[in-house]
Image (cartoon, helix red, strand yellow):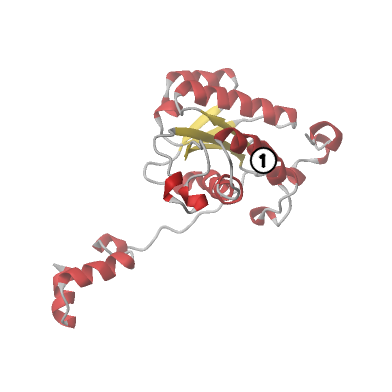
Amino acid sequence: MLQSRIAQSVGVSEATVSRVLARAGLSKLSDLDPREPVQRYEHAEAGDLLHIDTKKLGRIERPSHRVTGSRRDTVNGAGWEFLFVAVDDHARIAFTAMHPDERKESAVQFLRDAVAYYNRLGVTIKRLLTDNGPAFRSKAFRLACEQLGITQKFTRAYRPQTNGKAERFIQSALREWAYGWTYQNSEQRRHALHSWQHHYNWHRPHHGIGRVAPMSRLPPPRYNLLTVHI
């Protein structure tokens, strides 16, 4: 009804009003409601909270038409693989791995590998935040958390920003790693992930922590360059 009133008032069709409102992000009356304020927080120590999330990526069989510019290079039906990411809430140190799916077995394996990675840095994971996906809600994943002594928590329904640190990390990974280079195949992309993760953790300035590299936020007694700079 509101769109029809606007159309009548300005003398244009309802379809035109609808398109303009859609471009402005005002398709529904609820879009006018004030947005929830962004609540930024940071846990006091590394290991206090680990964010985990996933991202689906298309497999690469060869450079497609989006890279070459030729429709003859279109690749159909290559399938998917999944990027798992873990980000420490305090230090922003990240751990990543590619898996063929996002089932509970892959989720459990990633959790164990992530905990082992942080342990090598002298960081003990105490709490974990994930979304409400079936793999993270599974009995197998819950048991893995219990065995590792980790308290699991979930994001609020319809509030993906609750896991915002993992979401922002994924966006950086897509820009700088997944879509930042031309890969000949998925294996080449997976190989590049390890190098990019090292760059992110050890050398890349992070705006959220004062433009220093995440590894610099580990306490000095646990920050041994000779043993963990790998």
The residue nearer to you, when weighing 185 against 23, is 185
Residue at 46%, 28% (x, y): give it: 101
Q: Quadrant of the C terminus?
A: top right
> Within the image, what quadrant is residue 95 found in?
top right
Res. 33 visible in picture:
yes
> Within the image, what quadrant is residue 25 found in?
bottom left
Spot occupied by residue 221 in the image (x, y as percentages of width and height): 83, 36
* 201 lies above or below 133: below
Q: Name the residue at the front extreme.
A: 72
Residue at 19%, 82% (x, y): give it: 10
Spot occupied by residue 96 in the image (x, y as percentages of width and height): 60, 35
The residue nearer to you, when weighing 141 against 10, is 10
Q: Secondary structure at mark 1?
A: helix
> Within the image, what quadrant is residue 117 found in?
top right
What residue is pinned by disc 1?
197
Spot occupied by residue 66 in the image (x, y as percentages of width and height): 47, 51
Q: Quadrant of the N terminus?
A: bottom left
Res. 49 visible in picture:
no
Does 163 sit left or right of 89 as displayed?
Answer: left
* 86 lies above or below 209: above
Q: Amino acid at mark 1?
A: Gln
* Mark 1 burial class by Cα count in 10 Å: few <14, some 14-19, many 20+: some
